[in-house]
Image: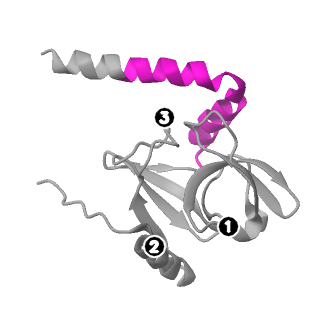
Amino acid sequence: MREEKRYIASEVLFSAIGEELAGRRRASFTVTGMSMWPFLCHGRDQVVVEACDPSELKRGDIVLLQTWRGNYLLHRVTGLRPGQFQTTGDGNCFRDGWFDRACLRARVSSLVRKGRRIDCRAAGWRAVSQSWMVLFPVRKPLLRLLTWLAKARRIGRNTY
C-alpha cells in the first residue's frame, strides 16, 4: 500500500513544527529540494528534528534555521564563532554565510530513508559527513561525478 503524500505551505508546516518543538516533542517532515543531496534526497528522505540549545551546536550538525527573510533552510553547520554559525548545503558549492544563533529552529537527530532510521550522532554518519565537509574545495567535480553515476544507474535499471 502506497502512502499518500500531502503538500502543505511551508508557513503552516514550520509553524506546526515550532509548536511540537515548544512542547519538547520531536517533529519530522519529508525533505524538499536538492541542496542537501547526496546526503538527503528530495521527496525520498524524512528528517526528525528536535529542539537544540544554540550553545550545543557542532560542526557537521544538520540544522533547521529561519533566515532574516523568513525562509527556512535545512543545511549543515560548517563554521562556528561566538554568537553565530555558518551553514552550507551538501549539494552546494558555496557557503550560505553567517547566521545569528537566534536563527536556529532545530537540529536533525535522525533521518528515515526507505523505512530505515539513521542516527545522525552515530560514528559512521558523522565520519562520512566530516569527510564530505573536508572535500568542500573539490565538491564541484565530485557532485558532477555523483550526478553522472546516478543517471547511469537509473538508465541501467530501465533497460531490463
Quadrant containing the N terminus in the rendered view: bottom left
Q: How many C-alpha atoms fall within 10 Å of the one at disc 2: few (<14), some, or many (≥20)?
A: few
Please tell me whether residue 67 belongs to the stretch shown in magenta.
no
Q: Which residue is mark 1?
A: 68
Which tag, 3 or 1, sits closer to the chain's start?
Answer: 3
- Classify 62 as above or below 40: below
Q: What kind of secondary structure does the magenta stretch mostly adopt? A: helix
Q: Which residue is mark 2?
A: 11
**Nearer the camera: disc 3 or disc 1:** 1
**Nearer the camera: disc 3 or disc 2:** 2
Q: Which residue is mark 3?
A: 38
Query: Exactly how many numbered labels are in the figure?
Result: 3
The magenta stretch is 121-150
Occupied quadrant, residue 10 = bottom left
CA–CA distance in space, label 1 to label 2: 15 Å
What type is the residue that disc 2 sits on? Glu
- For label 3, the SS is loop
Please tell me whether residue 129 belongs to the stretch shown in magenta.
yes
Report whether 149 appears left or right of 108.
left
What type is the residue that disc 3 sits on? Pro
CA–CA distance in space, label 3 to label 2: 26 Å
Quadrant containing the C terminus in the rendered view: top left
Q: Residue at x 47, y 74 (%)?
A: 17
- Residue 34 image offset from top left, x and y in percent: 46, 42
